Amino acid sequence: MQLRILSPAETLLEVEEATWVHLRLVDGTGLTVYPGHAPLLAETVTAPVRYADDSGEHAFDVEGGILEVDDQGVMVFTSGKPEAAESLRPSAVAEEKRFERLARELQEKLQGEPEPLLEGGVEETG
């Protein structure tokens, strides 16, 4: 059966001979489609679409969208491939500030006077 994943701008994935296709639906259930599956329209969530073909099993990350199953196979209409969440990626400015702070702390430690040691190599406290 054919598997096609389409965005408004392009065909993201096209597999001519998929053995099966597994998708996650908006209600939280998983759906595995085999050749000859009944026609179906459903909404999918952002999750990998898993499928198998002659070369093995594969996964393709895709945004949520609309699933159509017909006598030709499986088609997913989506807005595209998911991007990493911006909030999870540290900004370059934040990373630079963090680096500068760590470098400054290290430099202060290296320039500071070594603390006196008591006999036997034990640090003096108090």
Image (cartoon, rainbow, N blue to C red):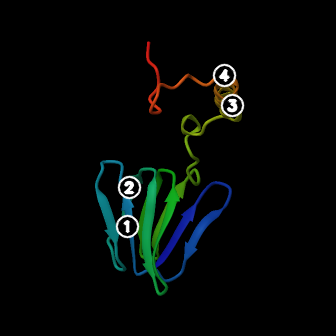
N-term-proximal mark, 3 vs 1: 1
- Of residues 111 and 74, the one drawn nearer to the viewer in this rendering: 111
- As displayed, is residue 109 above or below residue 41? above
Cα separation between marks 3 and 4: 14 Å
In the rendered image of this protein, does residue 34 appear above or below residue 44?
Answer: below
Q: Which amino acid type is shown beneath numbered disc 4? A: Gly
Q: Dot 2, crowdedness within 10 Å: few (<14), some or many (≥20)?
A: few
Q: Is residue 8 left or right of residue 43?
A: right
Q: Give the numbered dot on residue 42.
A: 2
Q: In the displayed structure, does residue 92 sit left or right of residue 55?
A: right
Against 102, residue 47 (above or below) is below
Question: Which is closer to the viewer, label 3 or label 1?
Answer: 3
Residue situated in front as seen by the camera: 44 or 81: 81
Amino acid type indicated by mark 1: His
In the current view of this chain or complex, which residue is farthest to the bottom? Answer: 54
| Residue at the disc numbered 1 | 22
Q: Which residue is mark 3?
A: 103
Few, some or many C-alpha atoms within 10 Å of disc 1 (few <14, some 14-19, many ≥20)?
A: some
